[in-house]
Image: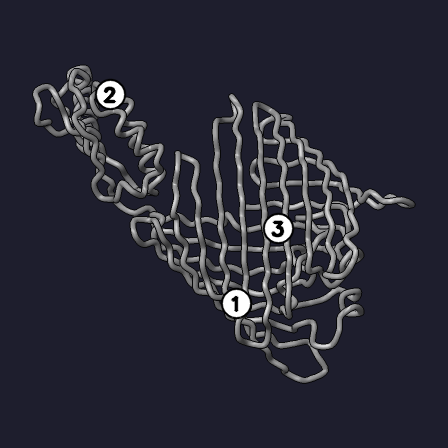
Amino acid sequence: MVAAVFFLGFLFGLFSARAFSWNPSDDTNVNSRYTVESVEITGASEARLSRGLREELRRYVGQRFSPEAFAKLSGRVRDELKARIVSPKLMKGTAPESVKVVLDVLGRRVNVTTDQSRLAWHTQQGWTGNLQVTVEELGKQRLTLGGFSDGDTSTERATGARAGYSHSIFSGRARVGLQASTAYANYDSRTLAAAGTNELYRNVDSFQPTVTFLPWRGAEREELTVEVGVRLQRFALLSPEANRNVASHALVNTLRYRRVRGDVATGRFTVTGLMGLTNGFGGDYSFDRQEVRGGAEYHRGASRLTVDFTGGSLRGDAPFTERFAAGNQLFLRGWNKFEIAPLGGRRLAASSVEYGHSLKGKLEASAFVDSGSIWNKGGTAVARNSVGAGLRTRDGFYFYVAFPLRDGRVEPLFMTGATF
């Protein structure tokens, strides 16, 4: 029995050693006396790694070989490339007492996620649901399928389905994609009462080809992306005229920036930015839409401070879907969007400051102050403020109670939801 166990253990050790390309005849301490002559990656392009990881790999050239260090580096390469296995191999170097380290990337890992899915509830707006399934192969091909009933983001409730496909090219520096969706709209009675003829739509079909570039990837957690696309839409208007269809064509350009420095223990600082430009051309509409978002978050130990700002402008004759909304779970939390802007607005300026403190495990208590205004050109921008507090977790669950700051009455709003 003992001999059988010993034999099985020997086979397991031999297989494991070969699987990870360590030479079973060499002792670890013996390998450690060699100098690393070069570090190479096979089976994938090194350009797909972050700049920080590429520089770290180069720093090991000229140093003593460390099995533990390269085991950790193999894991990081595997995670960044979403590979199934990264197998480190040792090869004889050109100089005496030197080795070449080859990290062999094997297989493509397929991830199935629902990261963009959301379920939320608001006192005045009811339920919002979005289920999106993403299937991705090694960061190369990506397929998304989903359904939604969104009564929060826009003034109307849009219910429908969407699908998308994208493919990475040029070693991950660019991605081409197609997105398609169809949605049916429902409106609050206050929106219907305020709308003019041919202002609202019954349903919309949308098709959008895009190309996304990655012109800059700095340190390990810093990158700049540019997305360029054409959005083609067909609307069936909610009007006395039966089946009146109109078209909207627009160029959509989006610039995104993200930078992360430090860690939670010593202080992690995150900066994000977005600039979106939409220009209508052809079709039945002609408009320009600009949106700018910026945010910063400082997280240290149990404390977190987040500051966000959003500004937007819409000019020209635009479809209803291009208007801004506030008084929801994104902007001016605590206010009712149907009360302050039942038809949305063409101008938006909103900010939020939130402080959170970890209680136990993943649970965090937080409080926020929101400020902003939504209005139309030629109108008066009325500044509004709200405060709130609640609980949230790192998994995406939250529960808030929010109060609009105004004279005369106190009407708390409750919001809860989760991303999964």
Q: Residue at x 64, y 61 (%)?
A: 314
Callout 2 crowding tier (Cα within 10 Å): few <14, some 14–19, many ≥20: some
Give the side of residue 372 with respect to residue 217, left or right: right
| Colouring used for the render | one colour
**Circles 3 and 1: CB atoms closer than 8 Å:** no
Q: Quadrant of residue 1?
A: top left
Q: Amino acid at mark 3?
A: Leu
Q: Which residue is mark 3?
A: 119
What secondary structure is found at the residue carrying circle 2? loop
**Residue 161, how many percent across, how many down?**
54, 64
Q: Nearer the viewer, mark 2 or mark 3?
A: 2
Q: Residue furthest front?
A: 378
Three-letter code for the amino acid on which mark 1 is drawn? Ala
Q: From this view, report whether residue 62 is shown above or below residue 418.
A: above
Q: Earlier in the sequence, mark 1 or mark 2?
A: 2
The residue indicated by pointer 1 is 250
Q: What type is the residue that disc 2 sits on?
A: Ser
Q: Is residue 11 visible?
A: no
- Percent x, y of residue 258: 48, 41
Q: Who is closer to the viewer here, 398 or 62?
A: 62
Mark seen at residue 319: none
- State which quadrant residue 69 falls in: top left
In this rendering, the answer to whether 104 lies above or below 187 is above
Q: Is residue 136 above or below residue 299?
A: below
